Image: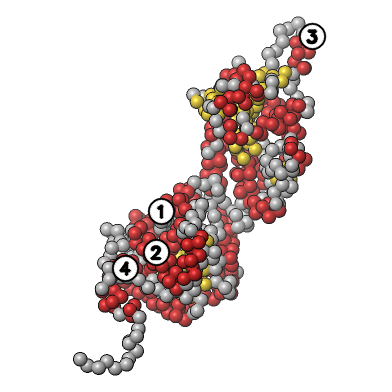
Amino acid sequence: MPSAKSPARKKAGKSSKAPPARALKFCVFGDSHIACVKHALDENLLDLTGIELAFWGAPGPQFRDLHLEEGRLVARGEAVRDSLAKINPTHSEALEPQGYDGFLFIGCRLRVSEFVLPLLASQPGSSDYLSAAVRDLMLTRWLDGCRWYRAAREFAKQRPVFFSPAGFLNDGILSEDEVARSVNTEATRAQRQVIWDRIDLAMQLDNIRLIQQPEDTVTRGGLTRAEFATQLGDQGDDSVHKNGAYGAMILNQALREMHAAPKKP
Amino acid sequence: MSEQHPNPYIGLPETAFWKRAVAARNPLEISHLWQPKFPVPRKHKVITAGSCFAQHFSRALVARGYGWLDAEPAPALLSDEQARDFNYGIFSFRTGNIYTARMLRQWLSYAFEGEEPPLEHWEKEGRFYDPLRPGIEPEGFADLAELQASRSAVLAAIRNAVMGADVFVFTMGLTECWRHRTSEFEYAMCPGTLAGRFDPEQHEFVNQSFVGIRRDMLAALKILRQANPKLKVLLTVSPVPLTATASGEHVLTATSHSKSVLRAVAGEVAAEFKHVDYFPSYEIITHPAYRGMFYAPNQRSVVPQGVNHVMESFFACQNEAFPWLARKSKRGGAKQGGGTAAANARAVKCDEEFLDAFG
């Protein structure tokens, strides 16, 4: 997966007398969830003006072979290094925060469903009600319990880091019994936003910017609309992964915020 | 040698005679203490509530792969320790300890009969405490709305538990309690201990009588029966002595009085109803035949070996009375629930410990 350079940037470089502004080097890091951003790139859905995009990460069990060591992510194991050599040949051994101008951590085993769904079920009057003290503990455990979130925290000490947790499970895959058990299908946008705001606040304390799941992709209280589910394999049984349209929304949002952020001198 | 005339004692089993059933035996080999009325197979859903000692029952059931029903489970994201701190997974619902028959009746009335819980709440340092279960959240609730929402959740959990269970194990703990003088609402703890303010004009000490406890127990059983006609009830009496007494008696004699009354009510009620049984965990721990071996040096806490012996006795008596349970158990192996390690690691929580420290 080679780096993707913006055509717009190249054009700007030819027509201007002033030295061309250096493209921002931006890295998408994650587990198999980085695929939705790659789909977006392949489908030409990304606005990469002034951006040099790269990917770093590994799918499935290999992802566990990426470890935070002295502030950088290191690939331990031949298989994961081989994978990385294909995805990002210049950084197949390790990913350092200094290697890029900004990062999007996507997926990374931080699953929205694990934290947001119990809270959506915990409305006053519900038998699943949880006190604010319990909800706070859950949030801390959810974030601190994810070692890639902890890695993001380290990276954020040096570079802008955006974090997009793995989105709600895809609608139409889970059985209706399972949906009834685990999803408050009556949950509203406002109820979700209260929870997103709480996550955002916690991440801000770590200097990380949350990219929340776009509301347009959410359905039935706490599921992802089927049209944003991956079509890969066409088995219709992937409840987790998302498609290019979803990946584009996430990355474009991160890049908009990256561009809007005040530049450090 | 005189000829022995026929009499009702002839032909009785060994367990009917002290000499052979107790005196001649190593205490750990005293057996057949209980003839259960109904089987408790693994597939049954068992719910537990009551005094501190009831916690051991749920842990033992979980450890042996029995179907303990947790109607108000902890969120998966909490650690075992955090869950315990917030009183999840201790009883089948987050009531905290239910020490008396009156408290059980109160909870069931709120859950099933539309009785309104008291409006009273306690405030301390800006936090809100539920007089029904003041220790349920370590730091109390953020506000009154949160307290009430959480209370609604526990009432729903009680309904789900009672209606979904096969067996309800209730451990009777105390006769002494504190009540509101006019409403007669019974507090889980004396106001002014964990939170609240003690006011002798409003709050009165009551040492419940046999008659009163029996009346409350019958009322509670009636509500349970109406909610779930197939529900069996297993009563036990906590062998844990009182931490403190407000009766004016010595705490040792007060303990003896309380436990004797509770034991008598449990026995009477169990004799009266086919669907109610009494399991003698109290005797196994407290009886002089066991020489106090199951108590810690403070002569109050029950050591793990005691709990283990109680539960081994429970399962042995069950298997003896219903041999098919043992066969099924063998076939199924020692099924270990997912939460076994957590359950074993869980220390018994007891509101009374607070009284011990601050009382």
> Disc 3 and disc 2: Cα gap in Å?
87 Å
Mark 1 to mark 2: distance in Å? 19 Å
Chain of the residue where label 1 is placed in the rendered structure:
B
Determine if residue A214 is in view: yes
Residue at screen point 66% across, 34% down: A33
Element type at marker 4? helix
Tell if the residue under mark 1 belongs to the same chain as the one under mark 2: yes
Q: Which amino acid does label 2 sit on?
A: Glu
Q: Where is residue A115 in the image (x, y as percent from the top left)?
A: 60, 44
Camera-nearest residue between B298 and A135: B298
Dot 3 amino acid type: Ser
| Chain under numbered label 2 | B
Residue annotated with mark 2: B312
Query: Mark 1 — residue?
Result: B347
Judged by depth in the image, the label closer to the viewer, 4 or 1, is 4
For the residues tagged 4 and 3, is the chain the same? no
Q: Which of B38 and B215 is in front in this view?
A: B38
